[in-house]
Image (cartoon, rainbow, N blue to C red):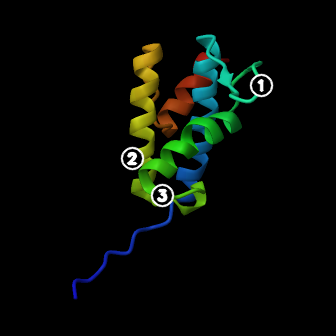
Amino acid sequence: MPEEKQIKQRTLLQNRSLHLTFSELAKILNEYGLNCDDKIINIDVPWSGENVKNIIWRPVQQALLGKSSTTELSTTDIDKVFDIIVKAVAEKTGEVLEWPSIQSIMDKQIWHE
């Protein structure tokens, strides 16, 4: 019987980066005037990090990996979901979201001071 590789749970740093990604993506979507489409009621709801998580990230995650909670994601799962979402958003907006890094966070802080 082949030995199964143990897949590591996402790290705390990945978790922080994941939620920062939700907020950054919400900002891009709002800047382009794109709203959350609620199929039950027809109102414009601006994007938030939580909306990105529940309306964009989670459905892709469930379809791709069969995992309903971000707490179930491994270190490699996050990359798979992120890549699909970034590609779709880039096709719609022309913006390419990068995974947060210490350098990118520092760069944003310098430019926003």
The kind of secondary structure element at disc 3 is loop
Residue at screen point 32% across, 75% down: 5
Task: Identify the element where label 1 is drawn.
Answer: loop
**35 or 75, which lies in front?**
35
From the top left corner, tell me how far across and down residue 2 is, in percent: 22, 83
**x then y, percent, for residue 23:** 64, 32
At x 65% / y 41%, what residue is drawn? 54
Residue 97 on image: x %, y %: 46, 27
Cα distance between the residues tagged 1 and 3: 28 Å
Q: Nearer the viewer, residue 84 or 40?
A: 40
Alpha carbons under labels 2 and 3: distance apart? 13 Å
Write down the residue under mark 3: 66
Q: Earlier in the sequence, mark 1 or mark 3?
A: 1
Residue 56: % across, % down: 56, 36
- Residue bearing mark 2: 80
Of tags 1 and 3, the one toward the viewer is: 1
* Image position of 103 with respect to 19: above or below: above
- Give the alpha-carbon distance from disc 1 to disc 2, as whole Å: 32 Å
Answer few, some or many: residues within 10 Å of disc 1's Cα (few below 14, many 20 plus, some between 14 and 19).
few
Q: Quadrant of residue 65?
A: bottom left
**SS assignment at label 2:** helix
Work out which quarter of the rendered image holds the N terminus and state it.
Answer: bottom left
Q: Which mark is residue 41?
A: 1
Quadrant of res 24: top right
Q: Which mark is residue 91?
A: none
Direction from residue 60 to residue 34 in the image, left or right:
right
Q: Give the residue type at disc 1.
A: Ile
First in sequence: mark 2 or mark 3? 3
Relative vertical location of residue 113 with respect to residue 11 in this rendering, above or below: above
Q: Is residue 5 above or below residue 98?
A: below
Contact, CB < 8 Å: mark 2 with mark 3?
A: no
Amino acid under disc 2:
Lys
